[in-house]
Image (cartoon, rainbow, N blue to C red):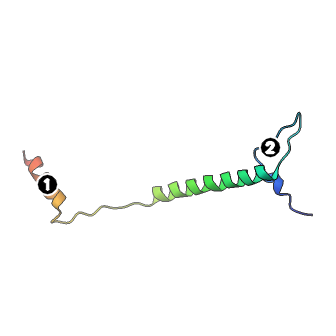
Amino acid sequence: MPFDFRRFDIYRKVPKDLTQPTYTGAIISICCCLFILFLFLSELTGFITTEVPTFGAGDSAWASWRPLMQS
């Protein structure tokens, strides 16, 4: 029993009352699903990964804020 690749076709051509899967539609559907999975995983990775900023005692950015806080 050979594997029917056309059953992955999400966007089927509709002639009258039946749907007809195509190889091109199956390839487009698989590519879209993989792209959606890639986008989801990259956003999830960006959400989970946290960066904790560390400021040193001699940080020049802190020194520039000091006069603003005193006035």
Q: Is residue 23 left or right of residue 40?
A: right
Residue sitting at 46 percent across and 55 percent down?
47
- How many marks can you see? 2
Q: Looking at this view, is 2 or 25 the one in front?
A: 25
Q: Earlier in the sequence, mark 2 or mark 1?
A: 2
- Label 2 secondary element: loop
What residue occupies the far left of the structure in this picture?
71
From the viewer's perspective, is the residue at label 2 or at label 1 nearer? 2
For mark 2, what is the residue? 12
Q: Is residue 7 left or right of residue 59?
A: right
Q: Position of residue 64 (x, y in %)?
A: 13, 54
Q: Quadrant of the N terminus?
A: bottom right
Would you identify the image quadrant in which residue 34 lies?
A: bottom right
Q: Is residue 44 left or right of residue 30?
A: left
Labelled pair 2, 1 in contact (Cβ < 8 Å): no
Q: Position of residue 10 (x, y in %)?
A: 76, 46
- Label 1 secondary element: helix
Q: In the rendered structure, which amino acid carries the disc numbered 2?
A: Arg
Residue sitting at 83 percent across and 38 percent down?
14
Q: Position of residue 66 (x, y in %)?
A: 11, 53
Q: In the rendered structure, which amino acid carries the disc numbered 1?
A: Ser
For mark 1, what is the residue? 64
Mark-to-mark CA distance, 2 and 1: 62 Å
